[in-house]
Amino acid sequence: MGFIDELKAKAKADKKTIVLPESMDKRTFEAASKIAKEGIADVVIIGTQEEIGKNGAGYDLSGVRIVDPFNDPNKQKYIDKFVELRAKKGVTPESAKEQMEKDYMYYACLMCKCGDADGVVSGACHSTGNTIRPALQLLKTKPGINSVSGFFLMEVPDCTLGYNGLFVFADCAVNVDFDSQKLAEIAAVSAESFRSFVGAEPKVAMLSYSTKGSAKHDDVTKVSDAVAIVKEKCPDLCVDGELQLDAALVESVGQLKAPGSPVAGHANTLVFPSLEAGNIGYKLVQRLAKANAYGPVLQGLAMPVNDLSRGCSADDIVGVVAMTAVQAQQA
Ligand code: ACO
């Protein structure tokens, strides 16, 4: 069974309610129809009769729940919650209603916050920033976590590196700049993501263009400081750095450049030193190694919300819904 089939099986074992707010896109309906048919999740689409009629025509939507944001008996509850959470930021009942009707991502996050749904998947026709922002504002981080980050579960074909070709790459999606503290937190949370999705022990490499002091620069110090922080906070975690990518992945190079490292040559969780490196890195592996790149999966949020690539297919949406449902089981 492949990685995504295993996830679907896990999702089916304890069905969660996942919201798809993008009724303006036909792929949402194709995916929802498949999700309902396969029994991966209880799926909700947010949309008006007009949007459903226009974009959902021809799809079997039996088993899919539709919530019309202009005609929903629960709407006042969501408006009240929005105001309760964001009054200090200037949100009024009028502006809450307007925002929820204009941007269904807010509606979906409020459904989660009020306990009417367990997770959200969006981004087929919205930017990452616009997908993530409502979740950051309304759902916030898990207790003890300061910042949300985004990982990709990479499945590299015919690869013996990592965990039989499976890797977590982070942060590839969210934090435009981070210091050592944030980088250390990303490492710890990514290790947890690897453990829960892959079911194996994470070996975390904190990546750089330097291995163990081979180069000197503030960028290198940022990574080596992060390694010290994460080692202190998570003494049982198998983490090391700073490591160059080849030292992290290839045993012979690891032995040469970082002898004695418990991670070098065996890394399965790659923590990149910047968003540029992470975002470019996952796309290189996806395109050149023809890897499956599942994500970006957001980690650290109090409830699971996940982004889609705008080039995604309906099957990609189904896969991300399965991942979101599994995260919801663990929330
Ligand atoms: N973790 C937790 N909370 C956060 C984080 C974070 N990483 N970043 C922002 N927040 C919170 C803020 O504290 C703030 O909360 P508040 O309103 O209650 O005070 C709220 O989110 C909004 O913060 P802003 O700083 O105003 O957010 P901004 O509008 O700058 O958006 C965002 C934040 C969306 C994450 C932004 O940093 C961003 O766009 N990141 C890059 C996304 C991207 O383009 N990724 C690459 C493409 S993805 C791909 O290729 C697959």
Image (cartoon, rainbow, N blue to C red):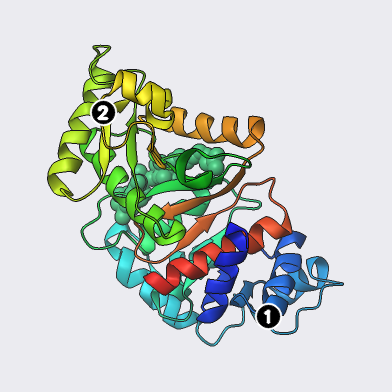
Left or right: where does residue 177 sit relative to residue 64? Answer: left
Q: Is 208 in front, or is 277?
A: 208
Q: Is 239 in front, or is 66?
A: 239
Which mark identifies residue 96?
A: none
Which badge, 2 or 1, comes first in the chain's sequence? 1
Q: Are marks 2 and 1 in contact (CB under 8 Å)?
A: no
Residue appearing at x 76%, y 66% in the figure: 30
Tell me: residue 199, above or below residue 73. Answer: above
Q: Which residue bears the numbered disc 2? A: 223
Q: Nearer the viewer, mark 2 or mark 1?
A: 2
Query: In this view, which residue lies farthest toward the bottom?
Result: 73
Quadrant in which the N terminus is drawn: bottom right
Left or right: where does residue 308 sit relative to residue 83? Answer: right
Could you tell me which secondary element the residue under label 2 belongs to? Answer: helix
Residue appearing at x 65%, y 59% in the figure: 317
Q: Residues within 10 Å of mark 2 (few under 14, many from 20)?
A: many
Mark 2 and mark 1: span between their CA atoms?
Answer: 46 Å
Quadrant in which the C terminus is drawn: bottom left
Quarter of the image where ligand 1 sits: top left
* Residue 121 screen position, x and y as percent: 56, 62
Query: In this view, which residue lies farthest toward the right?
Result: 58
Residue appearing at x 50%, y 81% in the figure: 14
Q: Say if residue 23 shows up in the picture.
A: yes
Q: Residues within 10 Å of mark 1 (few under 14, many from 20)?
A: some
Q: Amino acid at mark 1?
A: Val
* Residue 183 screen position, x and y as percent: 28, 38
Q: Which of the 4 quarters of the picture holds residue 36? A: bottom right
Q: Amino acid at mark 2?
A: Val
Q: Which residue bears the numbered disc 1? A: 64
Q: Which of the 4 quarters of the picture holds residue 80? A: bottom left
* Residue 306 screen position, x and y as percent: 51, 57
